[in-house]
Amino acid sequence: MAWSSTSRTAAMTSETADDLRKLVYPETYFVGLAPAELRLALLSRGFAPPASKPLRYLELGFGTGFSLNIHAAANDGEFWGNDFVRAHVDGAASIASVSGADAHFLPDAFSDLLKRDDLPMFDIIAAHGIWTWVPDEDRAAIVELLKRKLAPGGALYVSYNNTAGWSSVVFLRQMMKLFLAEKGGRAEIGDAVAFARSLQGANASYFKENPIAASELTMMASRNPVYLQQEYFLDDWKLMSVAEVERALKPAGLQFGAQFPIILHDDDLVLGQRGQEILSTLESPILRETVRETFQGMGFRQDVFVKRAAKLSDEERRNHFRKQAFLMTTRPRHVMLKGASPWGELDLSA
Ligand SMILES: C[S@@+](CC[C@H](N)C(=O)[O-])C[C@H]1O[C@@H](n2cnc3c(N)ncnc32)[C@H](O)[C@@H]1O
């Protein structure tokens, strides 16, 4: 459910004991940040993908820069990123020195990017694992950056914790943080989790009324402690719905474009027959997306927003699709028409 639940496996270490916001992250690759995937998601929803060549790409808060390095090495274009943890910048730059990719890794905070005069206009700006977990002033700096530095026709990838799936967890988080505050350094995260469990064991109604919170509490036993710290115990953590994110991005001239991954564009799968009937009665794009969000009820969303992107006719969309390059990494007869989806195993042959 959370930004990293499927990918964060390695242990993380705190850079300094007194600065919990500056954590060193594990090396992970996120396919949703790939230019080709973003293009495909937008095309699927009938939006013209960012067009300029060479591509100009910026990743905000790139962590170890593993994804950014792969994208810089595998795509034509100019790749930039920032992260205020020095170890991230140095590590990412040392990988790029081997690949020879055209990449610029900046040690700047988001607000410092606004002071630079050497940044180009970008076609894609990506922020994975950032939006929910930073303070309001950082979100404001990101919106200002998008306003100034995302080119017209450009796209923003943003992932965030979503109200539709996680609103019941807000209370669990508050309660465990209060417990730790009361103990004032004499208790650890594990103690706060044990405290919540003791309330559940004593039949507190909250856990019965909020099954997602109850299952989160169960899963905490197997979670990495630093993941728990990031998701449950840091001060900055703001859930939003897709409509709220769109509202926050409006001053930068952005509107919702498409959700990632594109399996979620499948109306039969997501909405079913009755959901599609309801959707067909609605006109507002953001209300329609909110209906899709309701049917998904997920705690973590990955979205692509666009700045003044053109809507394509069916014919234009087909032509764009034909120009996309694909690489088969297995023989066609070995391609399984089945796969995992949030709703269980999906049979694509049907
Ligand atoms: C949750 S991690 C996500 C890392 C990476 N995007 C990923 O998904 O693996 C958040 C990253 O943003 C960086 N970060 C947080 N606030 C920042 C700020 N104000 N300026 C620059 N980097 C920041 C952190 O150092 C960290 O690497």
Image: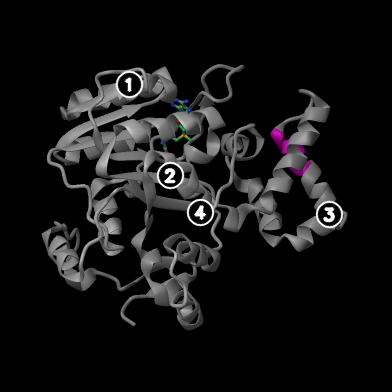
Magenta stretch: includes residue 253: no
Secondary structure mainly formed by the magenta segment: helix
Q: Left or right of 219: which side holds 280?
A: left
Question: Viewer-proximal residue, 258 or 260?
Answer: 258
Q: Is residue 166 above or below residue 29?
A: below
Q: For marks 4 and 2, give the one nearer the viewer.
A: 2
From the viewer's perspective, is 329 left or right of 26? left
User: Residue tagged by mark 3?
Assistant: 201
Mark 1 against mark 4, which lies toward the viewer? 4
Amino acid beneath label 1:
Leu
Front: mark 2 or 1: 2
Q: Secondary structure at mark 3?
A: helix
Identify the residue under disc 4. Answer: 243
| Residue to which mark 2 is pinned | 250
Q: Are marks 1 and 3 in contact (CB under 8 Å)?
A: no
Give the x, y percent position of residue 247: 49, 47
Q: Is residue 123 left or right of residue 20?
A: left
- Look at the image and say whether residue 193 sits in the magenta stretch: yes
CB within 8 Å, label 2 to label 1: no
Asked whether residue 316 appears in the rendered view, the answer is yes
The residues tagged by marks 1 and 3 sit, at their Cα atoms, a distance apart of 49 Å
Counting residues from the start of the chain, the first of labels 1 and 3 encountered is 1
Q: Of the residues under marks 2 and 1, which one precedes in the sequence?
A: 1
Q: Residue at x 53, y 68 (%)?
A: 295
Residue range (magenta): 189-194
Query: In x, y percent, where is residue 307?
Result: 31, 46
* Outermost residue, right side: 202
